[in-house]
């Protein structure tokens, strides 16, 4: 599978072409051709290869958030850059990794959590929510809401102060959880939604346009969806944030989109929903890239730098 049919309309970024060339040479298979365990292992291996590392001075601590939904609690990793010492009230940014609700873990977004903590600067909370198919919808949504409520009550424990703002963010399905949390938990400071999946119905032109391409395909999306949620629940507003009835009063949003992505147009649609309700929302579309680039700055150096700078500045403004 190549980008040839898209080249008359789009300029494919060199980093994108090289990424999929390297994956093809390594024999990487689409998730829908793998078992869940193989897909998870492949996702971690891909992050190890392409996420890179970054300079970070500060503390990295582990906590477990208590929850009625599982006896073991929800593990979180908390990053506090030394630059937070220069802030009167460093913000707390709760981040949910992507992975279609089935793959992904804290490890896969470790590098970007360090980047945001250092550059915003802020305290970053990296969440290990439950995954499907072992824990189907709404398990991860329950975990996300629980963690954000706990964070709001435990800012000082995490290295912030009582007046610190709390924001949420994520990529892919992680950003869907972030968006939903904003509808449930009051008084959040901001939301960062990276190629958000806010409408599981997926009736958008971009979903059709990019159904078959390198990276995230319709077959893969269907594979994730079947493992996560029953078809009858897709239109539940607690699954598809765009179907929520009330948007007024939500925190300001930064929406980052990949130009060559099935999720692109639902990101635009959510942006319009927010603006219609009087919510401040801004969009940044990264040209020539596909879904999945954002947490891989070791490879997508130029594309990630621009997107990550937007996020850090946005957090700084809302701290």
Image: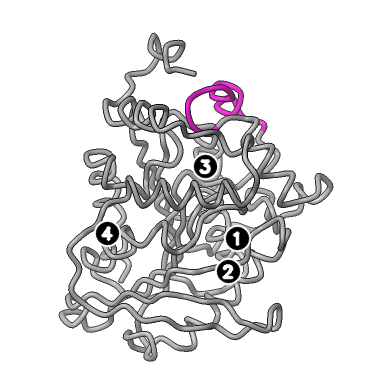
| Residue 207 falls inside the magenta stretch | yes
* Earlier-in-chain disc, 2 versus 1: 2
Residue 278 percent location from the top left of the image = 49, 54
Classify mark 4: residues with Cα within 10 Å, few (<14), some (14-19) or many (20+): some
Q: Which residue is mark 3?
A: 272
Q: Residue at x 57, y 59 (%)?
A: 177
* Earlier-in-chain disc, 4 versus 2: 2
Callout 2: SS: helix
User: From the viewer's perspective, is residue 183 above or below residue 227?
Assistant: below
Callout 4: SS: helix
Q: Which residue is mark 2?
A: 144
User: From the viewer's perspective, is residue 248 above or below residue 262?
Assistant: below
Q: Taking 19 as reference, is 250 left or right?
A: right
Visible residue check, residue 137: no
Tag 4–tag 1 contact (CB < 8 Å): no
Q: Residue at x 27, y 39 (%)?
A: 303
Residue 180: give its label.
1
Spatial separation of the CA atoms under disc 4 and disc 2: 22 Å
Magenta segment range? 203-216
Q: Which residue is mark 4?
A: 312
Tag 1–tag 3 contact (CB < 8 Å): no
């Amino acid at each position: 599978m190549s980008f040839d049919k898209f080249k008359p309309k789009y300029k494919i970024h060199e980093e994108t072409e090289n990424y999929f060339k390297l994956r093809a040479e390594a024999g990487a298979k689409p998730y829908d051709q793998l078992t869940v365990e193989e897909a998870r292992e492949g996702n971690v291996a891909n992050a190890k290869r392409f996420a890179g590392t970054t300079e970070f001075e500060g503390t990295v601590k582990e906590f477990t958030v208590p929850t009625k939904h599982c006896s073991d609690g929800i593990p979180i990793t908390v990053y506090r850059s030394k630059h937070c010492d220069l802030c009167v009230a460093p913000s707390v940014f709760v981040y949910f990794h992507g992975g279609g609700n089935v793959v992904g873990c804290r490890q896969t977004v470790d590098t970007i959590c360090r980047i945001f903590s250092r550059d915003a600067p802020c305290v970053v909370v990296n969440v290990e929510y439950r995954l499907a198919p072992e824990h189907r919808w709404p398990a991860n949504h329950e975990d996300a809401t629980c963690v954000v409520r706990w964070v709001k009550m435990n800012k000082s424990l995490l290295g912030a102060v009582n007046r610190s703002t709390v924001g949420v963010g994520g990529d892919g399905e992680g950003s869907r959880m972030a968006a939903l949390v904003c509808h449930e938990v009051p008084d959040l400071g901001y939301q960062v939604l990276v190629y958000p999946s806010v409408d599981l119905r997926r009736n958008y032109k971009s979903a059709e346009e990019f159904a078959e391409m390198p990276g995230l395909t319709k077959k893969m999306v269907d594979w994730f969806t079947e493992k996560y949620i029953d078809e009858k629940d897709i239109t539940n507003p607690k699954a598809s944030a765009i179907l929520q009835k009330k948007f007024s009063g939500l925190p300001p949003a930064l929406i980052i989109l990949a130009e060559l992505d099935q999720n692109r147009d639902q990101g635009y649609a959510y942006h319009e929903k927010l603006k219609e309700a009087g919510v401040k929302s801004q969009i940044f579309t990264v040209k020539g890239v596909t879904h999945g680039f954002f947490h891989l700055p070791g490879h997508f150096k130029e594309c990630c730098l621009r997107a990550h700078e937007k996020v850090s500045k946005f957090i700084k403004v809302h701290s």
